Image (cartoon, rainbow, N blue to C red):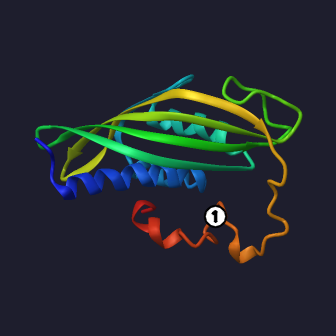
Amino acid sequence: MNGTLEDREDIRDIIGAYAHAIDRRRWDIMPNLFHEDAQFAFGTLTGDWKSFVDQARAVIDPCLATQHQLGQIIFGFEGEDICHTETYMTAMHTIPPDYPSSEIFPHKDTVYSAVIAGRYVDRFEKRNGEWRISMRTGLYDWREFREVEGVVLSDVPQEACGYHDDRDPSTPVVARYRG
């Protein structure tokens, strides 16, 4: 089965909303992307989706900026209510000099960029007419760390900057995921 175009778009929206939630620090979106019993595994971040969110916040919140770019998505439907997907992603993180040392982003005493290229391999389930993630496995294909300059936005007009709160112009776009 190939799934309907509507199913594919619903799933694609969930994948996109996940990247948005991480980058805009809108952690309140996560409950609307995962089934209550969903599991997560990405390197050292493992467990149920709720513990993953706590672990992800500890990794992402101290970053100066993040941006997750999503690439091709392959869909593998199994009947009408299960879909396996593989989504390519590139995640860019600007790490401050005082970043807490971790296995994911090493301590370097300087601002640097951490680029992770990988894939999300998901199991989606449609329950009560709604697609959500029931299992997410994140895979690293490669990563690199680069020293960077000019990462601050102090010379950019405020109206041209993105925010990690409701000032961000994308707020209406994700309203349906926020309750």
Residue displayed at 76% across by 36% down: 146
Depicted 171 relative to depicted 135: above or below: below
Counting every numbered tag in the picture gives: 1
Residue topped by disc 1: 165
Residue displayed at 84% across by 49% down: 149
Dot 1 crowding, Cα within 10 Å, few <14, some 14–19, many 20+: few
* Image x and y of residue 99, in percent: 80, 36
* Image x and y of residue 105, in percent: 71, 30
Pick whichever, 94 or 165, lies toward us: 94
- One can see residue 101 in this view: yes
Q: Residue flagged by tag 1: what amino acid is it?
A: Asp
Residue displayed at 52% across by 27% down: 141
For residue 7, side relative to residue 97 (left or right): left
Q: What quarter of the picture does the C terminus occupy? A: bottom left
- One can see residue 46 in this view: no
Residue displayed at 72% across by 26% down: 102
Q: What quarter of the picture does the N terminus occupy? A: top left
For residue 62, side relative to residue 120 (left or right): right
For residue 18, side relative to residue 122 (left or right): right
Depicted 30 relative to depicted 78: above or below: below
Circle 1 sits in a helix, a strand or a loop, which is it? loop
* Image x and y of residue 152, in percent: 82, 57
Pick whichever, 172 or 149, lies toward us: 149
Pick whichever, 57 or 4, lies toward us: 4
